[in-house]
Image (spheres, rainbow, N blue to C red):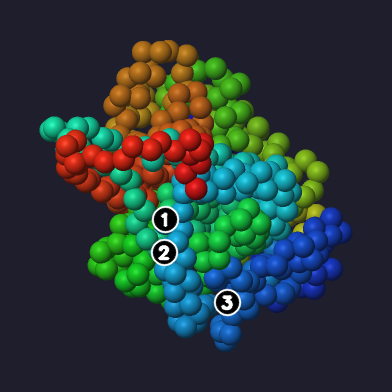
Amino acid sequence: MPAKLPHVRQIHGVRRSFATAVSRPPLSALSSVARAKAEQISAEWKGTSASGGNTKNFVGGEFVESQTSEWIDVVDPATQTLLTRVPETTSSEFKQAVDAASEAYKTWSRSSVLTRQRFVLELQHLLRKNADAVANSIVLEQGKTIADAQGDLLRGLQVVESASGIATALLGDTIEVSKDMDTSTRRLPLGVCASIAPFNFPAMIPLWTIPMAIATGNTLIVKPSERDPGAAMIIAELCQRAGLPAGVLNVVHGTVPTVNAICDNSSIRAISFVGGDRAGRHIYERGRKTGKRVQVNMGAKNHAVVMPDANKNHTLNSLVGAAFGAAGQRCMAISVAVLVGDSQGWLPELCERALRLKVKQGFEQGADLGPVISPAAKRRITGLIASAEEQGGGIILDGRDLEVPGYPDGNWVGPTVIEATADMRCYREEIFGPVLIVLKADTLDDALAIINANPYGNGTAIFTQSGATARKFEREVEVGQVGINVPIPVPLPMFSWSGNKASFLGDVPFYGRSGIDFYTQNKTTTALWKAEDAIGNKASVDMPTHH
Ligand code: NAD
């Protein structure tokens, strides 16, 4: 048995109840740094506020205040301060967005590919220039650290950069099939598309779809998470500054009614969704009923297998970073470590390293992870930790009692490590918090059996110094994204997302070559132009520009 760390609870102090944490403190509850950044966002960006004003919809090139009577509070997860409110978009406002996108489609779909490429290039430039604004908005609303927020934008920016190769990506095929007869296949856009995003990557996930959908000639309606809409609003304004014509990108806010309106609208041809299982399955089924193309990325349980021959220092640092970074709120976070054989003796050191992480508000110096998104998320996470206790699991490191000085109302959960078995709720359900479940296995085959029996298939990793072990694992594991000594193997956008099993519904995944496939349909044309019918005897001497 590994050594227990009974001192952890004392270090974390008194456990807080969040049942009453619903009143909204004034803006002065933010730190002076956070407040200055919040006020700067409100002053500089048309679509959103971080100091208590309303977030607008972006429809037909205008940032418009909704006339709805239903508003959703967006609060700082470290203090519960009201930053902004998002509207539950009314059905007539939603229709205006679809109409604007349908109208814009008529011209945008016929625009030159070079025009679309130039938009993408300009957008990547503006995103880099305004990266701090996007990252600040993410820290305020989502709670992650500033370094992590910059990474959130950067991973999305990489998709924008890859979309700048759109002219080459859209090249079709052609062949002369018989004398004077040619068959060609071209990739054409679908029409109005929609993108529905989760809270955990407020910049990256909208940017998985915005450049891909728009560069391929579609128009798009984005529905950001109602919990952190700011980054999407800043990105929308940057799209406008990058020269995107009115109506090509629209942003509407809301919750289930707005999502259902997207699923049911017959003018919308495709939906990209990233989020939880319940919403994902619902959107897939409802969207398919109206004949839409739907791609759905959902929940995960990502296992890391630790072999006894692994580089211990690299492995432990990788596990700690990937399990607890972003407070475990990454769909590719390592949420289960399968310790094989002698590597089980590394557990105390793993906990010691986890304990060294600094849990703080995201702008604070030295913060390694911030709060979880909401009091409800905290209750769910701590409830699952408690369920492990009830089912006989060992809470080796307990982050439930964490208090962070100066932030009494934050949704804090410290790094938590639970020794469990595969039948326990804490293993079977996605926790989506800074909790690492530890399972033990005698052999690589046992570890593979555990992973392959799990319904999810988003990501997995193995730590080993043996090429043969790594190769066997890579070949036999039934998970779509595999890291070998790499804890979070998120593919860069020259590749495509490839989560599988219960983590994905649909046929064509996100970004990369698949992203182009998802947002286009082929048109195959066969034409006969007989040589004997040719006319014309005067050449044009001007340089062709194709505009
Ligand atoms: P969520 O499902 O609660 O929300 C995602 C979106 O769906 C939001 O825009 C929300 O407004 C909408 N929504 C929520 N419930 C709905 C319902 N019942 N009907 C219709 N629409 C609904 O997800 P979240 O909490 O924002 O994000 C966390 C989840 O996202 C985790 O499960 C995580 O694994 C998953 N995720 C997956 C990936 C991936 O690529 N596989 C990436 C990021 C996040």
**Residue under the image location 57 percent in, 49 percent down:** 119
Dots 2, 1 in contact, CB < 8 A: yes
- According to the picture, the residue beneath numbered tag 1 turns out to be 110
**Residue under the image location 55 percent in, 32 percent down:** 319
Mark 1 residue type: Arg
- According to the picture, the residue beneath numbered tag 2 turns out to be 106
- According to the picture, the residue beneath numbered tag 3 turns out to be 87
Question: Does dot 3 land on a helix, a strand or a loop?
Answer: strand
Sort mark 1 into few (<14), some (14-19) or many (20+) by Cα contacts within 10 Å.
Answer: few
Sort mark 3 into few (<14), some (14-19) or many (20+) by Cα contacts within 10 Å.
Answer: many
Q: Earlier in the sequence, mark 3 or mark 2?
A: 3
Question: Does dot 2 land on a helix, a strand or a loop?
Answer: helix
Instruction: State the image coordinates of residue 131 (x, y, percent, origin top left).
Output: 70, 47
Instruction: State the image coordinates of residue 161 (x, y, percent, origin top left).
Output: 56, 39
C-alpha gap between disc 2 and disc 1: 7 Å
Dots 3, 2 in contact, CB < 8 A: no
Mark 3 residue type: Pro
Query: Could you tell whether 219 is left or right of 185 in the image?
Result: right
Instruction: State the image coordinates of residue 545 (x, y, percent, origin top left).
Output: 51, 41
Mark 2 residue type: Lys
